[in-house]
Amino acid sequence: PNAVQTVGSGDSRVIEINSQRLSEEQIREARTALFEEFKPVNAQGQPSEDAVNDSTVSESWGSSITQRMLLALGVFVLAVFAYIGLRMERDMAISAIIGVLIDLTIVSGLYALLGLDVSPATVIGLLTILAYSLYDTVVVFDKVQENTAGLFDSNRATYGEQVNLAINQTVMRSINTSIFSLVPIAALLVIAVWLMGVGTLKDLALVQFIGVICGTFNSIFFAAPMLVSLKMRQKKYQEHDEKVRKARERAAAGEEPADDAEDVPRAGTRTVVSPNAGLRTRREQQPDAAGPDTSGVSWRPGM
């Protein structure tokens, strides 16, 4: 057999044995051998060979499930690309889609590596984690869009630095959301495996548990850097980065202030000017026309 697992507990406990496709004669021999070895009982509590059941999953069922999963994935990808492309930017949509496909590849690879079965619950779980990963990525991209508004009006920061700032501003939110999402999924996994032995719940919880972790890392460490790489292929972003570099070099050499040449106030600062400042300046620069010219004259008591 390829896998043996116990499903359920107590009187409802069932032992499942998965194997390669067998012929009818091999199935009869296997049922007889299992009955003679374990003596399973039927619903009346009597040992019976009928208590050993068998079922065969055909290749057509697996092919049908695969086609439906690919169709659902294609519709999902197109809908996501259209929404993010219209709501945000095309490069953000491309980065998000690539990140979602990366999540799908990682989860599928782990299932193949560990030899886990793919059931309809697994397919549902895959689509669920794709939506979660997309949500986490959109949160980061929304902050990126906010930070890069008016990027070309200032020479203080490059596009990559603004993306890094957006990640720092949202990383704790992403981690906290992932933790609170993993707690109920882990509880579901524990209940499904150790308490109830429900295979369907186990398949659903396991794929969600893996997917939430992958989605969190993907939105921070892959989707955002991919967005920067796509942007830096455009000439205007390259020219802006060069302007920022030259401005910093001039500021380091003391040729001009570190701020933008257009004197744009720093974020979070406030400049307060007294209304009498200009009046005092004019009084200091212009001598009193009615008074005598005392420039160069000193006065001492008694003189």
Image (cartoon, rainbow, N blue to C red):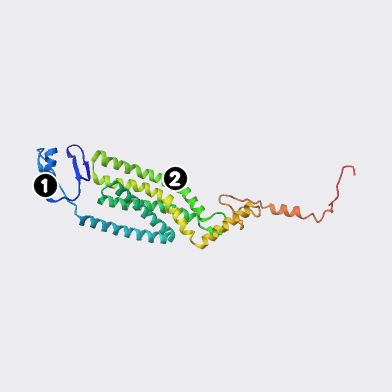
The front one of 191 and 273 is 191
Q: Which residue is mark 2?
A: 172
In the picture, residue 88 is in which quadrant?
bottom left
Position of residue 291 in the picture relative to residue 95 (left or right): right
Q: Identify the element where label 1 is drawn.
A: helix
Q: Position of residue 165 (x, y in %)?
A: 50, 50
Relative height, residue 236 to residue 103 (above, below): below
Residue extending farthest to the bottom is: 235
Residue under numbered circle 1: 28
Quadrant where the C terminus lies?
Answer: top right
Residue at 41%, 53% in the rendered image: 137
First in residue order: circle 2 vs circle 1: 1
Could you say which is closer to the camera, residue 148 or residue 251? 251
Does the image show residue 41? no
Query: What residue type is disc 2 on?
Result: Met
- Quick check: 87 above or below 11? below
Would you say 145 lies left or right of 53 here? right
Q: Quadrant of residue 154?
A: bottom right
Q: Amino acid at mark 1?
A: Arg
Q: Which mark is residue 59?
A: none
Secondary element at tag 2 = helix
Describe residue 122's horizontal placement relative to residue 26 as left or right.
right
Q: Position of residue 141 (x, y in %)?
A: 44, 54
Query: How far from the left and from the top, in percent, is residue 36?
Result: 11, 39
Q: Residue at x 37, y 46 (%)?
A: 213
* Within-10-Å neighbours for mark 2: few <14, some 14–19, many 20+: few
Residue shown at 37% from the left, 51% from the top: 133
Residue 69 seen anywhere in this rendered image of the structure: yes
Binning the other alpha carbons within 10 Å of mark 1 as few (below 14), some (14 to 19) or many (20 upward) gives few
